[in-house]
Image (spheres, rainbow, N blue to C red):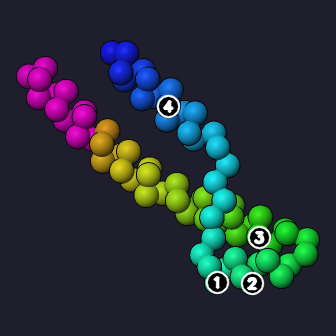
């Protein structure tokens, strides 16, 4: 039980860090922008696009968990 709690706390701590990533071409184009607003928008878009694969994996994992739990009860 303690290991599950440790993993959960570790995940929550890592999830709070700001993630900023760009491909090399995007970074080269956006570095020429002096205000930095376009780069911030691109970074936010990348983070939003990253959420969906994790949600899909979490949904599949939950479905597997629920089906195994139901099998044990029967």
Q: Position of residue 70 (x, y in %)?
A: 17, 28
Q: Earlier in the sequence, mark 3 or mark 1?
A: 1
Residue shown at the point (91%, 71%) measured from the top left: 35
- Left or right of 4 on screen, residue 71: left
Q: Is residue 30 above or below residue 54?
A: below
Using the rendered view, name the quadrant where residue 20 is placed. bottom right
Tag 2 near tag 1, CB within 8 Å: yes
Mark linked to residue 39: 3
According to the image, label 4 marks what residue? 10
Residue shown at the point (62%, 79%) measured from the top left: 24
According to the image, label 1 marks what residue? 25
Q: What residue range appears in magenta?
A: 63-74
Tag 3 near tag 1, CB within 8 Å: no
Q: Position of residue 63 (x, y in %)?
A: 27, 41
Q: Earlier in the sequence, mark 4 or mark 1?
A: 4
Q: Earlier in the sequence, mark 4 or mark 3?
A: 4
Label 4, label 2: how far apart the Cα atoms are: 35 Å
């Amino acid at each position: 039980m303690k290991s599950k709690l440790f993993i959960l706390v570790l995940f929550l701590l890592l999830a709070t860090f700001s993630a900023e990533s760009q491909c090399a071409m995007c970074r080269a184009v956006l570095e020429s922008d002096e205000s930095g607003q376009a780069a911030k928008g691109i970074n936010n878009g990348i983070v939003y696009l990253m959420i969906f694969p994790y949600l899909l994996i979490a949904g599949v994992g939950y479905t597997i968990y629920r089906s195994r739990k139901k099998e044990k009860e029967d």
